[in-house]
Amino acid sequence: MSQKKGFDIAQLVIGIIGILLAAAGLFKFVPVLVGKQDRFSCDLQPDTALGGEVWTVMYRNDQETKPWLKMVTTLDCR
């Protein structure tokens, strides 16, 4: 065991980070990634890597609609 007394830099940094996280939790700080008016939909988009089309989740906000997540090349909706 170490005979060192007091705080070292690592303990101080960890303490400061803990205080900051606790303060953020008290203020309910949550970064907004998707707004209330933003929408998602599915659409067939061209697949440039394999050719053909791929089902893609599209993200739409007030300014634009853009691909968000490529899904599958076939979709069976029975």
Image (tube, rainbow, N blue to C red):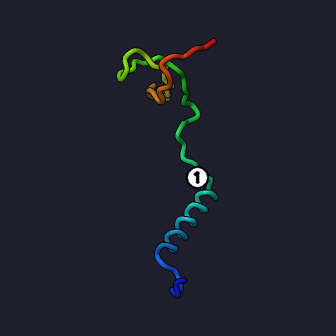
Name the outermost residue toward the front.
1
Q: Residue at x 44, y 26 (%)?
A: 66
Label 1: state its secondary structure: loop
Name the outermost residue toward the top.
78
Q: Which residue is mark 1?
A: 29
Q: Residue at x 45, y 19 (%)?
A: 54
| Mark 1 residue crowding within 10 angstroms, few (<14) / some (14–19) / many (20+) | few
| Quadrant including the C terminus | top right
In the rendered view, tell whether residue 20 sits above or below residue 32. below
Position in image of residue 59 (x %, y %): 50, 28
Position in image of residue 69 (x %, y %): 48, 29
In the rendered view, tell whether residue 17 sits above or below residue 57. below
Position in image of residue 2 (x %, y %): 52, 84
| Quadrant including the N terminus | bottom right
Q: Amino acid at mark 1?
A: Phe
Position in image of residue 67 (x %, y %): 45, 27
